[in-house]
Amino acid sequence: MPGVGGTVASFVAYGQAIQTTPRDQRSRFGSGDIRGIIAPEAAVDSKDGGSLLPTVAFGLPGSEGGLILLTVLTVHGIVPGIPMLTTGLPLTFTLITALLLSNLLTSAVGLALTPYFARLTALRIDRIALPIIVVSFVTIVQLNGLLIDLYVAVAFGLAGYMLKRLAWPQIPFVISFVLGGFIERNLALSVELARVGRLNPLQRPASLTIMVIIALSLAWIVRGGVLPPRRVKPKRADAAVAWLLTGGCAVMAAISLQGQPGYSIFAQAVAWCCLFAMLAVALVQTISLVGHEKQGGGRTHTIPESHRVPLMMMLLLPAAVWLAGLPAALSLFTLIWIAAGQKLTLKSAALASCTSVAVAVATWFYLDRIAAIDLPASAMSHLF
């Protein structure tokens, strides 16, 4: 599918692997079952060939790599489409052969380096997470030169953590986030064409077939055909997050009442349907929680004690960036992260201080000298 890429391909392949597994073995997925690893990895390797087809034949990039390839072809004056399948056929077969050889080469290299990569699992997760977080934040700011991107990334990171801790599925959110804009634009176009009489979906066999498939898929999911039912202890955080999302849906539904031209009747209907659906989820979560606590189930702690300091640091990082600037904020972030993970001695304090200073200098040097990004001045700089 053009524009989807490897992210959606991995999730679809993983879901297909679960659906084709006997029901009594599906509980193994998520705990190291090799089938859950082979399926998405095979999809990631094979999606390049699928994305190459619409790129070469129609000029529609199937992934990020396809977009780069399309740009390179355009720069060199090569027009995708019929010319690539007729007069430019040798170049097309060259691309196919190069893709085949690259897969063989990366497979050989991957197998050779697997024993060394496996040693990463023996490292402490906090020592791996700190450099990844710092590099990710610097890269996010470097992309567009805007601090708002950092704030959005922190918000999505905290939301993803809560989804994982509460055992809420992340895959539907990722797929809808990747495809949401694409679906929304085409849906709006289809509704407008139907309104002016240029399109009637009920008279097209393809659209009718897709509608039937969607209806059957939803019915199958409702009947529990994907995964066996699991009994999960209700948590206060489940109900809190559900009511928080309900409040957000209520705000959006209220905004949609301003009517046309800002929001069509269709958009208003979508907003209010989402509100009612989320309200039903929140009520079910609350009723389940109350019943569980009345039966003596007790409260369950959602966030482990060892996670609370890093999460609080992530939550306060945007404010620190706004107050002191990105280099100073990441330096303080590194200092607290290292100090909180070990006993405070003269050696550990010196190590944490030197590392934090190095992070600040490296961040400033990269953004100012290499990336040449002029970030907005911090609030403290205006005071002095």
Image (cartoon, rainbow, N blue to C red):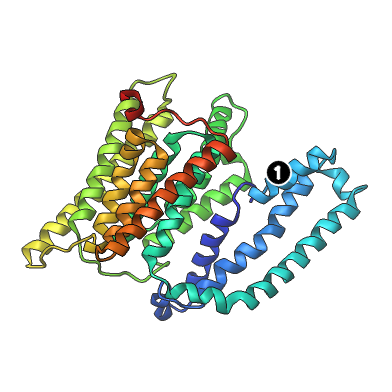
Q: Nearer the viewer, residue 60 or 374?
A: 374
Which quadrant holds the C terminus?
top left
> Horizontal and vertical percent for residue 311?
29, 53
> Horizontal and vertical percent for residue 126?
36, 63
**Dot 1: what SS?**
loop
Query: In the rendered view, does 293 fall on the left or right side of 345?
Result: left
Q: Residue at x 29, y 32 (%)?
A: 251
- Residue 184, compared with residue 97, is above or below; it is above
- Residue 277, compared with residue 109, is above or below; it is above
Q: Residue at x 43, y 53 (%)?
A: 133
Q: Nearer the viewer, residue 381 or 109?
A: 381
Residue tagged 1 = 60
Query: In the rendered view, does 34 fall on the left or right side of 382?
Result: right
Kind of residue at disc 1: Leu
- Residue 316, compared with residue 40, is above or below; it is above
Name of the residue lying farthest toward the right:
87
Label total for image? 1
Q: Nearer the viewer, residue 15 or 329?
A: 329
- Residue 351, compared with residue 136, is above or below; it is below
Query: In the rendered view, does 330 fall on the left or right side of 106?
Result: left
Query: In the rendered view, does 214 fall on the left or right side of 41?
Result: left
Res 287 visible: yes
> Horizontal and vertical percent for residue 122?
43, 76
Q: Residue at x 44, y 50 (%)?
A: 358
Res 168 visible: no
Label 1, residues with CA under 10 Å away: few <14, some 14-19, many ≥20 = many
> Horizontal and vertical percent for residue 152?
40, 40
